[in-house]
Image (cartoon, rainbow, N blue to C red):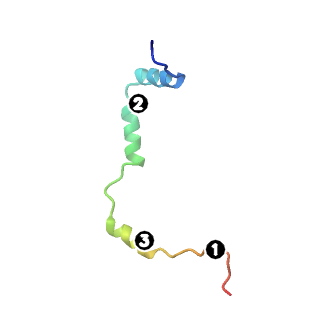
Amino acid sequence: MAAYESDITRFLKKLKHERPHLDAEQQKGRAIWWDKDAIDLEQTRRWREARVPQKSYPYQTES
């Protein structure tokens, strides 16, 4: 008995078969938006230290 394959799975398999370069383009796009250089720990520490705590109700006036 064959395993069930959804319409979307069949579509994606067909698409990747017709366009073999698609995987490389996806990886290139991911590298642009998500895969960033190493995190600057010193800069992250300074951002955290510079943060100003927010009031529990931002529109509250001082009494």
Q: CA distance from mark 1 to mark 2?
A: 47 Å
> At 42% from the left edge and 71% from the top edge, which residue is drawn?
48
> At 38% from the left edge and 73% from the top edge, which residue is drawn?
46
Q: In the rendering, which numbered label is found on residue 13?
A: none
Characterize the local packing of mark 1: few (<14), some (14-19) or many (20 or more) Cα atoms within 10 angstroms. Answer: few
Which mark sits nearer the N-terminus, 1 or 2? 2
Q: CA distance from mark 3 to mark 2?
A: 40 Å
Circle 3/circle 1 CB separation < 8 Å: no
Q: Which residue is mark 2?
A: 22
Q: Which residue is mark 3?
A: 48
Which mark sits nearer the N-terminus, 3 or 1? 3
Residue situated in front as seen by the camera: 45 or 34 = 45
Q: Secondary structure at mark 3?
A: helix
Q: Which residue is mark 1?
A: 58
Q: Secondary structure at mark 1?
A: loop
Amino acid at circle 2: Leu
> At 41% from the left edge and 21% from the top edge, which residue is drawn?
17
Characterize the local packing of mark 2: few (<14), some (14-19) or many (20 or more) Cα atoms within 10 angstroms. Answer: few
Circle 3/circle 2 CB separation < 8 Å: no
